[in-house]
Amino acid sequence: MKGYAVTEGKEPRGKNSLAIFLARLRLAIVALTFLAIAGAIPATAQQLAPDGAPNPTASGVNQQQLLRAEPRIEGYIDIPDTRARVLAQPAGRTWDYFHEVTLHWFGAIVIIGMIALLGGAYLIVGRLRISAGRSEKKVHRFSPFERFSHWLTAVSFVILGLTGLNITFGKILLLPVLGPDAFSSLSQAAKYVHNFTSFAFVIGLVLIVAMWFKDNIPRRVDIDWLKQGGGFVKSRHAPAGRFNAGEKAVFWIALLAGIAVTASGFLLLFPFYVTDILGMQVALIVHAVIAVLFVAVILAHIYIGTLGMEGAFEAMGTGEVDLNWAKEHHDLWLQDQLAKEHRPAPSSAAD
Amino acid sequence: MPWGINRRRVVTINDGKPGERSVSMACMHCTDPPCAAVCPVECIFPTEDGIVLHNKDQCIGCGYCFYACPFGAPQYPRVSNFGSRGKMDKCTYCAGGGGPEAPGSAEEFAKYGSNRFGEGKLPMCAEMCSTKSLLAGDGDVIGQIYKERVVQRGYGSGAWGWLTAYHEDVDV
């Protein structure tokens, strides 16, 4: 084109020739620019294949472009199963990494760490005895209904914990021992037990919260209890009402963690009813992480209620505690309780 | 095959808009399959040929393979209460099942569908595809055919899922 313009420019004669040449040159440049623009439009709209034929798919969406813009590719599908609309979700591999690497390490460290901590406490501090010895006088602490609610929650928690841990750690710990077929049957049963026991746990948790909410509201005495070493320092007396600050902590953790595992658990129990694939993945992450922490806290709760402290288990066992135990651990509650029962208050701690 | 299972599905992206593409998707038989890694009873496994199979006798229907699968391949027949899932079903590459059933037996056919692979045939979908946009076979051979197509006819919209499934893209 440019060559053509220059050749044309030779023909005019006289003093105007330069001006005409420049005018033609300008025209040539403009034409070139126009052609360049005109050529650029088909280049983007219709890419040519290497053999020169137009490529009809060149303008179609491209997987890498879509994945750069969105974490997953979704489209339209004829079948009613809406889950199938997701064409690709590379996040599945990330979720797999969480479940197989992060969760295994996190769960093992938290649970084995807590067991080691409690073992260490038992070896170093030992069982916390009733300093004054048993008085052989009993005080009523928990009603049969309170104990029923506690044990409903407790038994279902242990079942849920074991069947839940089986899903994550069973293939490492039990599969090599039982063999694939027996382990699969066990896990199948464990899945159903886990699903159904969840309802018992929720009922127990609701009862516990309804009964003990008032007595677990933090009070000023809880700060004193913490300052006095929470009953772990023998020389100091830690005052407490019906529940001490440690028990209150267990209560509030159980309530909050209970809500988290229940909400995420029901999302998993009714898959895709209310959420999509990302929601299900997040629900499982929340469920697993909170449950592992919950198990660790409850292990400490079980330790202090059984091995860790003399006289503590009776409260949930028979419902009655020794008078001296109550005096040492729940003095403020003991005063109220004895007044309620019209019994004389004990004169001193060594009564 | 259980009712309501679609081993292969076509998803239309940008439906009715410029750049619309329809992509046919099934199990990609991934390298390092996330479904197999995540399975709590280890009933999913890649075979020597790189086909991902599973044992329905051991599957507990937990649904984790669907959360881990980048391509939405695992599906579960609804068998009982709530959202409870039955034994997982997915594309088997028409290579039968991963259970104890004898290859090519009626029991295997009832649970997993045909075992064309055992008869030396390719998956039905790839054999039937009229435009040969679905190809099945050895990864290197498929990669070579794909490269030739790109050289002849251009890149098109790419080989969907290849990078996610096999950790490497097809070099063109």
Image (cartoon, coloured by chain):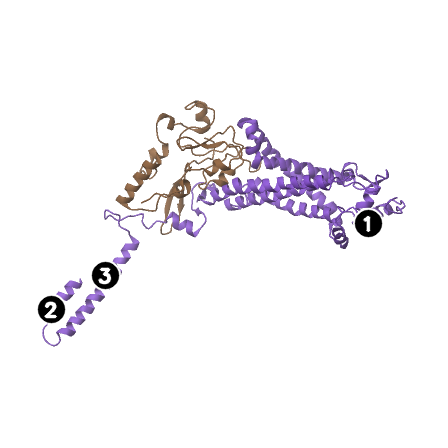
Chain colours: A purple, B brown
The residue wearing badge 2 is A10
Say which of A176 and A129 sits in front: A129
Classify mark 3: residues with Cα within 10 Å, few (<14), some (14-19) or many (20+): few
Amino acid type, label 2: Lys
**Residue A110 visible somewhere in the drawing:** yes
Circle 1: element type: helix
Residue B8: where, in percent of width, then height?
Answer: 41, 37
Amino acid type, label 3: Leu
The residue wearing badge 1 is A332
Residue A272: where, in percent of width, then height?
Answer: 53, 42
Sequence-wise, the earlier of marks 1 and 3 is: 3
Which image quadrant for residue A316? top right
Residue drawn at x 86%, y 39% as measured from the top left: A135
Say which of A347 and A243 sits in front: A347
Quadrant in the picture for the N terminus of chain A: bottom left
Residue drawn at x 36%, y 25% as measured from the top left: B119
The residue wearing badge 3 is A35
Circle 3: element type: helix
Query: Which dot, 1 or 3, sits closer to the camera?
Result: 1
Say which of B62 and A101 sits in front: A101
Instruction: Give the side of residue B103 with respect to residue A245, left or right.
Output: left
Classify mark 1: residues with Cα within 10 Å, few (<14), some (14-19) or many (20+): some
Residue drawn at x 59%, y 41% as measured from the top left: A107
Query: What distance separates the C-alpha of mark 3 from that of mark 2?
Result: 24 Å
Instruction: In the rendered view, tell whether residue A237 sits above or below residue A160.
Output: below
